Every structure is written in C-alpha cells, then in structure tokens.
Image: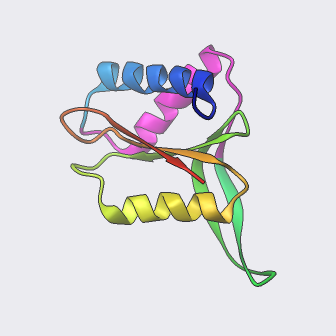
Amino acid sequence: MYLYQDLTYKLRGIFFEVYNNLGPGLPEKVYQRAIIWELKSHKIPYETEKIIDIIYKGTKVGQQRLDLVVSEKIIVEIKAVDNIHSLFVKQTLAYLKASSYKLALLVNFGGDKIIIRRYIN
C-alpha cells in the first residue's frame, strides 16, 4: 500500500476520464476546469490556485501558486505539453519541498497519451 492510495486511484480515474473526453491539444486551464468539474461531482474537496510561501532561513522570499490541492493532501500540477520537461519535474519537487504536502501528481494532457507522474516528499 502506498501513500494516499485510495485518493490517488480516484484522481487517476478522473484524469483518464478528462483525457478520454477532451483528448490532447487544449490549454491547461481547460483540463483544470474539467478536473474541477469531476472533483465536484465526486464530492472530493479541493483548492484551486493555492498560494504557498517560499521560506528561506525563516524569511518569506516569495510565493508560488499550485494548480490544485486535493483533500488537503495532494498537489496536482497540470501540464498540456508534448513532453514533460525536466523543468516541470523540478518545479513540482520544489512545490513539495516548500509546502507541508507529502505527495504531488504531475499530469500531462498534451501528448498522444496521458502521463501521470507521482512524487513523494
């Protein structure tokens, strides 16, 4: 069993549902809105565009905006690109490090198939 297994399973189902209905080639915001629609219909709590503070040696030095936080547990970063560039992976890992969350899902809707990557803090 792995971290947040049941919730992750539900989210993967939602991501595939969105991809199967919309396909690739749309802007990230479209996929985000479709995911939100599914989260609402499944009564799964979420926050969108959540702001987290970046702290350096006890001082706030910046902020970052997360696409989605689901059930106050999982960061969901949404991309709609041909390939997941290493920059997106580094960005997702930085979000985990800067936050109190333990799990992030990086989801790419832009390719010929959906890609879901899981990262643990």
Q: Name the quadrant containing residue 5.
A: top right
Quarter of the picture holding the C terminus: bottom right
Vertical relation: 31 (above or below) 62:
above
x and y, in percent, of residue 6 in the image: 60, 21
Quick check: is 71 in the magenta stretch?
A: no
User: Within the magenta stretch, is there residue 28?
Assistant: yes
- Horizontal side of residue 76 vs 18, given as left or right: right
The image's colouring method is rainbow
* Quarter of the image that includes the N terminus: top right
Q: Which residues are magenta?
A: 25-48
> Which residue: 68% across, 50% down?
101
Q: Position of residue 54 (x, y in %)?
A: 68, 72
Instruction: Give the tally of numbered discs.
Output: 0
- Residue at x 71% of width, y 33% of height: 71
Among all residues in the image, which is located at the extreme front? 1
Question: Most extreme residue toward the left, as rendered?
Answer: 112
On the image, which quarter does residue 78 sit in? top left
**In-image side of 3 versus 31 (left or right):** right
Between 7 and 38, the one nearer to me in the picture: 7
Residue 106 percent coordinates (x, y): 44, 46
The reply, left or right, for residue 92 in relation to residue 49 is: left
Percent position (x, y) of residue 72?
73, 39
Give the residue displayed 46% in from the left and 26% down from the top.
Answer: 12
Q: Residue at x 40, y 44 (%)?
A: 28
User: Hey, which quadrant is residue 36 in on the image?
Assistant: top right
Does residue 12 appear to the left or right of 102 in the view shown? left
